[in-house]
Image: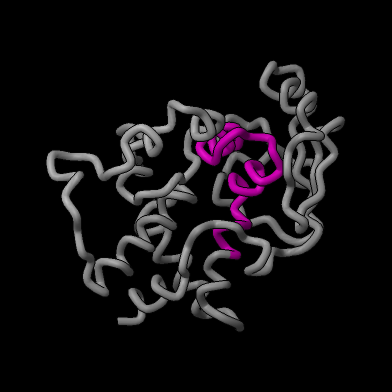
Amino acid sequence: MARYKDSVCRQCRREGIKLFLKGDRCYSQKCAIDRRGYAPGQHGQMRRKFSEYGLQLREKQKARRIYGVLEKQFRNYFKKAASQKGVTGENLLRLLECRLDNVVYRMGFGLSRPQARQLVRYGHIEVNGKRVTIPSFQVKEKDVISVRENSRSLSLFKEISEAGESKVVPEWLSVNFDTLTGEVVSLPNREDIDVPIEEHLIVELYSK
């Protein structure tokens, strides 16, 4: 499957905001947005005025890059969100938030979503006691997500466990950093999702 293999910092610069794709680096002075807060490329520093379609497209691209999904995957998420009851935009964000890799990141077991995705693929994560290696796996209410017992001795997880008290975990999740185990208390509402996305623009884009 095709994946973006260039510098992920270029994606942040393209969208003009921090997408937090490199963990702690995004909070340091090395962050590309802080050092070069303009779009990449030869004409990156030129002022651009986006059309209505351009604004909608940029919002969709921003959402894709934050959650690390491909175009076809994203379109399938939208179709599923549109078929569900409720507000389509909120349904879409809820589906993206409930991806296993995102939940692992939200629980603090990964420093960034790309790292959390890698942890899932390498078999370090269990859901309800069973190893799951599919980053797009949809978690449900009351699911228990944990780091495999054989993986807890890795230096990464030891550091996460020791720094657990300083991590901010969303209210729809609960985490025990001593055992590196968490539970999905409830599915997230829109106010629980702190991503800088105007989902109504994505709905307008796909509704054309």
Q: Is residue 2 visible?
A: no
Could you say where residue 189 lies in the image, as x and y percent from the top left?
68, 68
**Range of residues picked out in magenta:** 94-120
Task: Name the spot of residue 74 as percent of width and height, x first.
Answer: 42, 61
Inspect this view and state whether residue 131 appears: yes
Left or right relative to 103: residue 186: right
Residue 63 x %, y %? 44, 57
In terms of secondary structure, what is the magenta stretch mainly? helix
Q: Residue at x 54, y 41 (%)?
A: 113
Q: Foreground: 47 or 148?
A: 47
State whether residue 57 is above or below residue 9.
Answer: below
Q: Image point 39% across, 65% down: which residue? A: 75
- Report the residue at 55% width, 64% height from top: 93
Q: Residue at x 19, y 55 (%)?
A: 47
Q: Is residue 38 magenta?
A: no
State left or right for residue 49 relative to residue 177. left
